[in-house]
Image (tube, grey):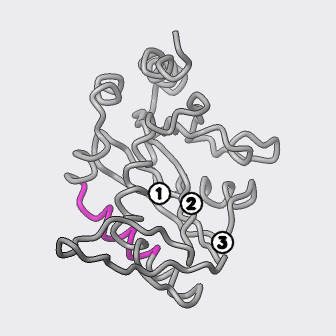
Amino acid sequence: MPRRLRLKKTLPDWVKTTRRLHPDKGVTVWWQDEARLGMQGSVTRVWAPTGTRPRAICQREFEWTYLYGSVEPKTGRVHGLRLPEVSTVAMNLYLADFSKHLDDDEHALMVLDGAAWHKANALTIPANITLLVQPPYSPELNPMELVWGNGERNYFCNRALHTIDDVEHAADRLWILQTQDPHAMRSLCGFEWILSAVS
């Protein structure tokens, strides 16, 4: 069985095991990822009259900020934090903040990719979180990738961001406007195989 299909088959078992290990808690399944956002945006398609060649802004500066985000596809709940880097230290900050926002009777099974800072020995995993690493080279399994893709197209493409403050403001705006509607998040991120695994 291809590695990327294995998660679809084993996710229900992971949910059952997590529930068995934490019988006094309600287990929720979250998907986590990070997005690098910066001045060097992308050029995308734009509407233009036939026969014309539209112009688009493309910067070459190298200043970035990072959005750490998680979504619970079943309910559309989200959690996000903007940090200046991706590292074990930053991931520890994110997990600690995420943990504080969980209900007292909740335990989160968090699925994330195999980035080095997700598996580092120095990573401090709070007691109310269990981490599950998704197979390598399978970003299509993670619903957060859709959130980032939509957000980058809407808030970072064909735009000039002159300072890091502009980048951070655009990143905050991306997160708030993309995730404010739980129904839209459920619709975007509620893959059938995920919802059947957590039911």
Residue corresponding to mark 2: 97
In the depicted structure, whether residue 70 falls above or below residue 166: above
- Residue at 43% x, 69% y is 43
Q: Going by the picture, which residue comes out furthest to the top?
A: 1
Q: Nearer the viewer, mark 3 or mark 1?
A: 3
Instruction: Return the residue at label 3.
Output: 84
The answer to whether residue 136 is left or right of residue 145 is right
Q: Residue at x 33, y 42 (%)?
A: 73
Dot 3 amino acid type: Pro
Q: In the rendered image of this protein, does residue 84 appear above or below residue 149?
A: below
Disc 2 secondary structure class:
helix
SS assignment at label 1: loop
- Residue 195 lies, with reference to residue 94, above or below; the image says above
Q: Quadrant of residue 15?
A: top left
Report how far apart the C-alphas of labels 3 and 1 lie in the structure. Answer: 21 Å
- Which one is nearer the viewer's eye here, 163 or 83? 163
For disc 3, the neighbor class at 10 Å (few under 14, some 14 to 19, many from 20) is: few
Name the residue located 39 percent from the left edge and 70 percent from the top edge: 174
Q: Amino acid at mark 1?
A: His
Question: In terms of depth relative to the viewer, which is nearer, 123 or 172?
Answer: 172
Helix, strand or loop under label 3: loop
Q: Amino acid at mark 2?
A: Asp
Residue hosting label 1: 101
The x, y position of residue 96, in whole percent, is: 62, 56
The residues tagged by marks 1 and 2 sit, at their Cα atoms, a distance apart of 7 Å
Q: Are marks 1 and 2 in contact (CB under 8 Å)?
A: yes
What residue range appears in magenta?
A: 171-182
